[in-house]
Amino acid sequence: MSTATAPAPSRSSTHSTLSRLTFGGILRSEWIKLRSLRSTFWCYLLILVLNIGFAALVASVGVGSGGGPGDGSTTSTAAGSGMANATVAVTLGINFTVLIAAVLGALMITGEYGTGMIKSTFAADPRRLGALFGKAIVFGVVTFVVGLVSLVIATLVATPLLDSESNISIDWSDGSFWLALVGGAGFLALAGLISLFLGAIIRASAGGIAAGIGLLFVMPIVLQIFTGLTNAKWAANIASFLPSNAGGLMFGYSAGEAKVVDGIVTLDQFFGFLVMVGWVILTGILAVVLVKRRDA
Amino acid sequence: MIHAQNLTKRYGDRVALDHVSFDVKPGMVTGFLGPNGAGKSTTMRLIVGLDRASEGDVTVNGKHYSEHRAPLREVGVLLDAKAVHRGRSAFDHLLAMGATHGIGKKRVDEVIALTGLESVAKKRVGGFSLGMGQRLGIAAALLGDPATLILDEPVNGLDPEGVVWVRNLAKHLAREGRTVFLSSHLMSEMAQTADHIIVLGRGRVIADESVDKVLARAKGDGVRVRTPQVAELTPLLNTAGVTVTGTAADLLEVHGLPSSRIGEIAASQGLVLHELTPLAGSLEDAYMALTADEVEYRDTAAAPSTATKNSEVVR
């Protein structure tokens, strides 16, 4: 605090010629923001540790070498169900780490509303949508990459354990296995994005996180109880289209076939992905409308 | 150049700004004065598009703020000190802000040095004092080397050294031909910094003129005279166009005569003067007079009468 002398800020020419607001610049800005907060670092570290830890834990306990409850697996060969079990082991952590991704997604934007940072953000990008999409893209990509890296490491860690405990050898050339890993990372990113847009809609951290977790975790349970009590088909059908249920198919091993049996809808892996994208678009549109219209 | 035309902002039933029009010109410091709640911050938020006007329009250099290709280079704004994420360092905050416009580390280091934040730049903003937060806000405003600066209560929380620094900075930037618009609720602060003053009261412009004019009007022409011979002096001064009021046993306040003339009159009659002081009415007094009816908390107490009075004043 020693600078009280007369300032000398002449309009410097170094950055005056080319500098203007660009979407690339916004992306860089959002990346700097993301990496410069400790909370982001800890959340991603936790995602990494838990995904790897759960895989190691399950693999070390053993998952059964064939014919086990392979999460919707329809493959009947022993090798196929072995890979299905391996997939369950490796991606089990996703069911928990999606919670962290949802919290982080909401915090990406509610953290700015809570601290007043959003005013600086919107002053730099007064049209606002660049900032919103920039955040979404940076968060989505980083979450996807962290998720995928964690699942690949989880597989590497689980490989010897699965071999010794369950007599399953991981087949790295199995496309369905890779699809499940990519799907798991994609589920983390998309679930986080739904939460991010909910955060933009609600603006308060507590509310944004509650909405994200409510949609991802509470709604399915409520509907499950309701369906169990009333046997209502419509409730079961709504449940299949919830992000957690539809998105859960994204990291299944050859997860079933899309069909309608007896008035009850069953989705497959690809439809699960589409439903997740649909949720992201839906919440995204609502967020865009509100962010554009409201006072910051 | 900031051009506001019929700017109106309503929050539900409450009218925060009521058809406000003004221009803020480049090359000088324009002070924006008014009691708390007069609408100063709202106006500034409308200028940079953080809030949407209910009616009317405001442009910066001929365009809406959001229409500029490089908003941060057009307008630098300090709205809330600490419009910053508490968990981020000052350096990272500025770097992220600048990145949107391709402004790099070099300029970030420049504004950090300029605002004297070198020693704390890598620390998290959450631990900053009010003054340091203020300096960071000013650093962010200067980041784009903007042609227009909008600073809301910039001296808030600054130590005396910092206050002088902001004052000099504002004047310096104005001399470079920039538009400098700063708000305060302290007239004394404006008197030392601004060339032109816009006074806002309860969402309306109640004065828009040069500081010199406001000062001249505030000064009046009173002279305080202290003499043990009040009885002898009073009739001598009491001529046409002059009013003499006794404020104490040995004290007179004279209006309509310059102090030099009073001294001559007293001398010519051999009267003793103990004091002869031209009364410089302060800017503070002028401001108080201007805003006396506009202070918001009086609303509820005397709503009907003040409301009508205000509308008369403005019309």
Image (cartoon, coloured by chain):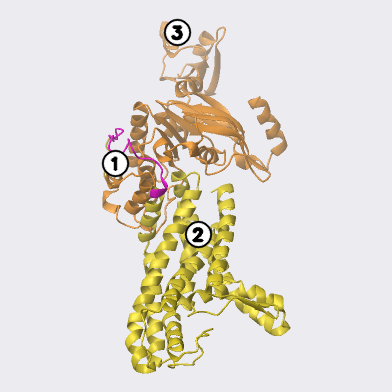
Query: Which quadrant holds residue B205?
Result: top right
Percent across and percent down for residue B289 are: 56, 29
Q: Position of residue A283 (x, y in %)?
A: 57, 60
Which residues fall within the magenta stretch?
Answer: A7-24
Camera-side residue: A189 or B155? A189
Amino acid beneath label 1: Leu
Of all chains in the rendering, the one displayed in yellow is A
Q: Colour of chain B?
A: orange
Please identify the residue farthest to the front as the structure is shown. Answer: A77
Nearer the camera: disc 2 or disc 3: 2
Q: Position of residue B223 (x, y in %)?
A: 47, 18
In the displayed structure image, the side of residue B246 where residue B86 appears, left or right: left
Q: Main secondary structure of the magenta part?
A: loop
Which residue matches tag 1?
Answer: B114
Residue at numbered disc 2: A110
Q: Secondary structure at mark 1?
A: helix
Q: Taking A202 as reference, is A161 above or below it?
A: below
* Residue A65 placement: quadrant: bottom left
Q: Amino acid at mark 3?
A: Ile
Q: Give the foreground label among 3 and 1.
A: 1
Q: Residues within 10 Å of mark 1 (few under 14, many from 20)?
A: many
Q: Closer to the N terminus: mark 3 or mark 1?
A: 1
Please identify, in this view, whether the residue under mark 1 or under mark 2 is nearer the observer: 2
Where's the C terminus of chain B, which quadrant? top right
Mark 1 belongs to chain: B
Q: Which residue is mark 3?
A: B265
| Camera-side residue of A44 and A86 | A86
In this rendering, is residue A40 above or below B196? below
Tell me the distance, in whole angstroms, between the alpha carbons under discs 1 and 2.
Answer: 31 Å
